[in-house]
Amino acid sequence: MDEKYQEIISNTLNLFYKYGIRSLTIDDICRHLSISKKTIYKYISNKSDLVEKAINKSFEIMQKNILLYYDIKGNAIDKIISLSRHTIEECRNFNPIILFELKEYYAGIYDKFLSERKNLILGLCEDNIKQGISEDIYRSNIPIDLYAKINFYNSELFLNKELMQSLNNYSVTQISMALIDNSVRSVVNENGIKYYEQQILKIHQNNK
């Protein structure tokens, strides 16, 4: 697609993040983007089509960022910590209403987004466990498929409105660090736990 299309979709996605999806009409979006309805309808057929294109863009960005922070030099524990710290920052800036509205009003688009996200993260969870075993920092007898799925579903916590509301006494950082701790400690061996605790100590010291 051409540059104008990319500009419209990217800017629309930013509007959805800021205001939510339901409250914005095509007229509102055109006004914010300073374009005519004639222009926007060159690239979309209706609002549902625009939402789908914007969410596809959101997944592309998410995938790029996840791989950027995961594909670092280091062992399996380094990769979990790097990706999780990135996730903390993302969650701080993310407006959860966009997912709640997708689920309520655009169920098909929501289901597709979750499916693609699941395939991406579950694959990384499996790769991470295999890497950790090969590096002798994870236990060798781990049922890889089971533990990968458990770690994936732990990562889904931020998509669960009710669960997040029940944890509103805790910050995103506290919740995220608890999830990291739970995930790592469930798979590491003696070598891994020593290394993990050293890295966490460094993080705490750097944050002082």
Image: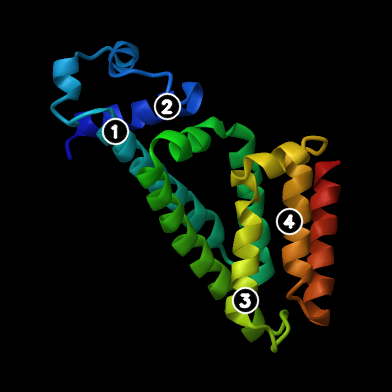
Task: Give yes or no for contact between labels 1 and 3 (Cβ–Cβ under 8 Å).
Answer: no
Q: Are marks 4 and 1 in contact (CB under 8 Å)?
A: no
The residue under the point 79% across, 69% down is: 185
Amino acid carrying mark 3 in the image? Leu
Kind of residue at disc 4: Leu
Q: Position of residue 208 (x, y in %)?
A: 86, 41
Q: Residue at x 59, y 33 (%)?
A: 93
Q: Which amino acid is tagged 2?
A: Ile
Name the one closer to the observer, 132 or 126.
Answer: 126
* Residue corresponding to mark 4: 179
Q: Is residue 141 above or below residue 162?
A: below
Left or right relative to 180: residue 14: left
Q: Which residue bears the numbered disc 2? A: 21
Q: SS class of the residue under badge 4? A: helix
Kindly state the secondary structure of the residue where label 2 is placed: loop
Could you say where residue 43 lies in the image, as x and y percent from the top left? 17, 31
First along the sequence among labels 4 and 1: 1
Q: Residue at x 22, y 32 (%)?
A: 5
Instruction: Report, in whole angstroms, how far the alpha carbon at label 2 lies from the one at label 3.
Output: 36 Å
Residue position for label 3: 146
Nearer the camera: disc 4 or disc 1: 1
Q: Which residue is denoted by mark 1 in the rendering? A: 48
Tell me which label, 2 or 3, sits earlier in the chain.
2
Residue 74 seen in the current view: no
Residue 23 position by quadrant: top left
Q: Residues within 10 Å of mark 1 (few under 14, many from 20)?
A: few
Q: Secondary structure at mark 1?
A: helix
Which of pointers 3 and 4 lies earlier in the amino acid sequence? 3
* Mark 1 vs mark 3, CA separation in Å: 36 Å
Where is residue 108 drawn, in percent x and y? 36, 46
**Quadrant containing the N terminus in the rendered view:** top left
